[in-house]
Amino acid sequence: MARKAIIILILSLSFVFSLDLALAAVDGEWEVTIRGVTKVKFKGERSVSFWAEGGDFFTFGAKGDFNTFGEDMEGTWLQEGKKFLVSLQPEAIGNYFGDLFEWMSPYYGYDIVPHNIVITKNAFSGTEGKDGDIIKGKYTLAITFTYSNGKLKQELPGSASVTAKFTGERY
C-alpha cells in the first residue's frame, strides 16, 4: 500500500513539474520594446552612431523557430530554465544591415551597397520573468564588409554593429 502511494506521489509530482515547465516556456508571441545603438564605420567617411527606440513582436515557435515582425529577422531558439538563446539566420542579419545602408545612403550622397559581408557577432539572449509573463534581454549583431563609395572604383572596408536591450510582455 505504501509503495502504491509513493508511486502515485512521484507520478503526481512529475505531472506538476512538467506542467510548470510547459507554462514557463517563452514559446508564443511577445510585444517588445527595444532600445539600442547602431554604429557604422566606412573607411574614408565619418563614422555614424545613433540611438533608437521602438517596438516589435517576437514570436518563439513551439518547434524552436523564431521571428520578428518589424525587422523580418528569423532564426531558432532554445531555452534552459528561465534563460533563452536565439540564433539569427546569417541571411536575415545581412538583409537587416543592407536595409540600414539603403536608409543611410542619402546622408552620404551615394548608394552604399555592401559586399563580402562577414558576421562577426550574433549574440541574442534573455531571461523569462518569474511568472512567465515578461522577458528581457540583449542582442548584439556585428559585421564587417566591403563597399564601393561611388567616388572611387575600389572596394573599401567597413564595419557596423547594433547593440540593443529589450523588454517584452506576452501578447
Image: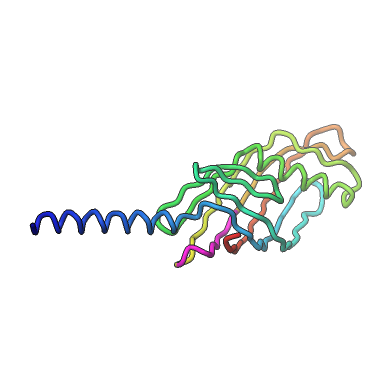
Q: How is the image coloured?
A: rainbow
* Name of the residue lying farthest toward the front: 1
Estimate the x, y position of residue 63 in percent, counting from the top left: 49, 41
Q: Which residues are magenta?
A: 131-139
Q: Please tell me which residue lies in front, 154 or 90.
A: 90
* Name of the residue lying farthest toward the left: 1
- On the picture, is 153 further left or further right than 92? right
| Image quarter of the C terminus | bottom right
Assess whether residue 95 is covered by the magenta stretch. Answer: no
Number of marks drawn: 0
SS assignment for the magenta stretch, majority: strand
- On the picture, is 21 further left or further right than 95? left
Q: Please tell me which residue lies in front, 114 or 95.
A: 95
Estimate the x, y position of residue 103 in percent, counting from the top left: 83, 48
Q: Please tell me which residue lies in front, 56 or 147.
A: 56
| Image quarter of the N terminus | bottom left
Q: Residue at x 40, y 56 (%)?
A: 81
Estimate the x, y position of residue 143 in percent, counting from the top left: 66, 44
Q: Residue 119 falls in which quadrant of the image?
A: top right
Q: Residue 110 falls in which quadrant of the image?
A: top right
Position of 169 relative to 103 (above/below): below
Q: Residue at x 54, y 62 (%)?
A: 135
Q: Residue at x 71, y 56 (%)?
A: 38
